[in-house]
Image (cartoon, rainbow, N blue to C red):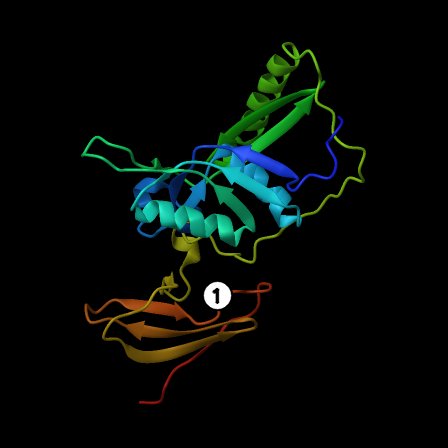
Amino acid sequence: MLLKENCQYSLLVPTSMGVRITPVNGQPVHRGGMFMMQATSAETNVATVAAYLGLPVKVLTTFVKGSPIADFIRGELRRRNITYEGPEVAQGGPWGYRHQINIADAGFGVRVLYQGGWGFAAGSDLGSIPATFARALDNAKSTARRLSRPIRLADKQVHTGRFTSPCLVDRLAGEGDRVGGLTPDLGHADSSTMLGKRESEGWQGRTTRTSSGSVRWICTSPRRARPSTTRWSWPST
């Protein structure tokens, strides 16, 4: 692949941008109470990788005039060190122009390069990773059969890595997560009274009773390095 030299930008991306709303902590949409909004498009997702590596990247897109979503998209692009350029169009009436809003489960994507052809597939169920990979491979094979110029990756050193989540407790696993009959809770208890203190290595919290009478354990340091012995201490009566 031959690239032009002495250019102002390493990557120039025309795209149409919208926002995606997904539940936090990997929850499905029907169980999510808190949602996170991200500015996204297939093209800018790729461009973000180059921008994070320090390369100059520019996005060409259209913004809806006076839309707070448009302001959010601009801010997200600036945060990713991506410059942008594009016209503003008036919103118009109820059926006028709007930025697309997509509500979806949090998930993962798989990209496969097979004989010069790219294939992509996505999913939200971690149990379907092998099937998702198979779909991505099938898509790559289909693409490879139609390419006149196969895609080749640059001759660079391959880097591999592994990430281990610090969360060791599956809060949806049921009764196995309950400690001493108390359910771990990362939220806050309203009108609560201090009942006790739970201490463990790398993980501390307190037990409270809410105004409704239920008992909660409030985690004050949610990151836990490794399993450890838990000690409960209660105030004297």
Residue 133, placed above or below residue 198: above
Residue 72, placed above or below residue 94: below
Nearer the observer, 7 or 213? 7
Figure quadrant of residue 208: bottom left
Give coordinates of residue 163: x percent, y percent. Answer: 63, 50
Q: Which residue lies at the image location 73% right of the left edge and 31% below the top edge? A: 3
Whether residue 231 sits left or right of residue 133 in the image: it is left
Rendered-image quadrant of the C terminus: bottom left
Whether residue 107 sits left or right of residue 227 in the image: it is left
Nearer the observer, 84 or 163? 84
Give coordinates of residue 107: x percent, y percent. Answer: 47, 39
Q: Which residue lies at the image location 57% right of the left edge and 73% below the top edge? A: 201
Give coordinates of residue 131: x percent, y percent. Answer: 54, 25
Dot 1 falls on a residue whose secondary structure is: loop
Q: Which residue is mark 1?
A: 222
Nearer the observer, 175 or 35? 35
Q: Which residue lies at the image location 73% right of the left edge and 32% below the top edge? A: 4
Look at the image and tell me whether residue 37 can be seen: no
Give coordinates of residue 185: x percent, y percent. Answer: 37, 63
Residue 53, placed above or below residue 151: below
